[in-house]
Image (tube, rainbow, N blue to C red):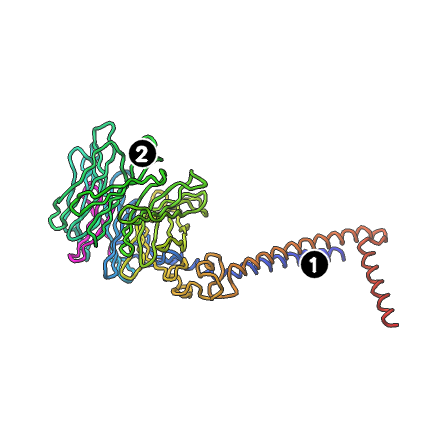
Amino acid sequence: MTFKLRKQLKITFLLAILFLSNVVIVSQFNILSIKAQITDEQIEPTTNFAPSKSSDYLLGITYTWLEDFKVVGSAVVSDSLGNSYITGTVNTDLITNTDIFLGKTNASGEILWLKKWDFQEKDIANDIVIDESRNQLFVIGETLINTTFGYSDVLVVCFDTNTGEEIWNATYGELDLSEEGNSAVYYSSKLFITGTQTTFFHLYSSPNVFSVCIDSLSSSILWMQNNTSSSYDFTPSIVIDENQEELFLVFNRYLKISNDQLYRFHLRKLLLNGSTIWESIFGIDESIKINDAYFSESTDTIKITGQCNEIDSPANKDAILLTLDTSGVLLQEIKIGSESLDEFALTVTAVNESLYIGGYGESDVRSNQASFLSKISLDGEIFWFDKIDKYAISSINDLSIDSQDRLIVVGSCKFDYDYLFERLLLAITKDSDSDNLSDYFEEIIGTDPENPDSDADGYTDGEEYLGYTDPLNANSNPRNRLRLRNLAIVLFILLVVSFMVIQFSINTFSRKSKTNEKSAIVLFFEKIRLKIKGRKKRIDS
């Protein structure tokens, strides 16, 4: 009898645990199954190239493409018809050989073509601009001129926007200098390019920033501004205020070449003829490093992004977004990132009343390099900041806004099984309601892309999806899930305690029954029974 009772109690205890587990798991099963279904979606390879397509809650329509050994997307530009054009570099071997690639997507988010372009042993693409009136694209970068000593010239290649075929190419540089083109803008049939140049065969040579203006029709140099000094300049970026016809050149400069952790950034204002109006040096924080700049026409301000030291943990980096007016006055400083993790912002762009910044950082899920994306209002409110953890390694290198206000993302990624290989990362997304979910993804899971809280339960669709609750069920939300979890914990504790009490009572009863001596628990229940009987007799009388 005792053995049967013990067995029944153990079975009951196990069933109770299974029941509580199911209560917690079933509540999120629907949203998890949707997530698994979406992230694993694949498409058939397209003619002449084989990108794979998937959907992502943040990146929306996502393409990855592997060619040769390594494909890194570096820049993207969009036209007024909803088309976007991407460029970057393809490593054709594991050592030095690289080619340039060019791609086009249409208004429907489909890749129309991807093409490689080869000039020298080492060709690198860093930026891309467009002349819509002539259907021309201009890829700016560098090409290896001297294979013996390894120095390069600035490379500009003009392509047809419809076919991707080359129209012309040109290189620019001096014999004793190695140059690379880093950033460019197009305006009134002119290319304004900035980059760095280094003197070769000089023991103490260091990179200096330069700027150059090129006629896009004749490919001839109109003017060039050099800065030969002992300073160490890097990652220059150039933007244009078309209304005032003024250029702004932003670059970093080391304070000490021997200590690459201390630097300041410079902002130089130029006329279109190359004349310098003024130059400001910013020493807000000697850890700030600038990677990209964007001119906001709606606010007449310059948005600059990069990274800086964390306040509480200087060994780690935070992404930073700075806003300056056209006089060089700092208006706003925003730091973004996770505590005690590194984040490096590489690019910034704007649409309507919002800013997007992208880059990479340390993942708090997989302990690897994960790309990140953040949406921020123009007045500094952070709508969301999120990292993409599904890749082994990933980075967002450039952003563009197309004519449909969609965000075009370009960068690179690696899957767990890629080992030495690296893929192009291309994404087309839009978050109309700022709920941290792409409109394309919301259409798939059934939520409203124009309403941040589809089930009106006080939580955004993004908070519910990322919290493993159902954004279409008002009763399923992070608050109720937390309550359910706490209830399950309490019930589990009560079950464990009850089981221990019952088990103790059974063991005590078993030992006492052998000597016909009543145990303490039996005497306790008999005492209660006698009291109940006595109370019942008094009531009957």
Q: Toward which corner of the image does residue 494 lie, by quadrant?
A: bottom right
Across and down, in percent, residue 238 comes to 24, 46
Q: Earlier in the sequence, mark 1 or mark 2?
A: 1
Instruction: State whether residue 274 is above or below residue 232.
Output: below
Report the disc number at residue 329.
Answer: none
Across and down, in percent, residue 225 comes to 18, 40
**Around disc 1, counting alpha carbons within 10 Å, would you say few (fewer than 14), some (14 to 19), or many (20 or more)?**
few
Is 505 left, or right, of 494 in this rendering?
Answer: right
Q: Residue furthest right?
A: 541
Instruction: State whether residue 65 is above or below residue 457.
Output: above
Q: Residue at x 34, y 47 (%)?
A: 322
Question: Residue under circle 1?
Answer: 8
- Viewer-proximal residue among 467 and 253: 253
The residues bearing labels 1 and 2 have C-alpha atoms spaced at a distance of 76 Å
Instruction: State whether residue 281 is above or below residue 218.
Output: above
- Secondary structure found at label 1: helix
Instruction: State whether residue 521 is above or below residue 205.
Output: below
Name which residue type carries label 2: Leu
Magenta stretch prevailing secondary structure: strand
- Secondary structure found at label 2: strand
Q: Which residues are magenta?
A: 113-142
Q: Residue at x 67, y 53 (%)?
A: 496
Residue 93 visible in the shown view? no
Q: Residue at x 57, y 61 (%)?
A: 23
- Viewer-proximal residue among 37 and 142: 142
Residue 257 visible in the shown view? yes
**Can you tell which of label 1 and label 2 is closer to the viewer?**
2
Across and down, in percent, residue 371 comes to 37, 48
97 in magenta: no
Question: Residue under circle 2?
Answer: 255
Q: Quadrant of the N terminus?
A: bottom right
- Viewer-proximal residue among 357 and 178: 357
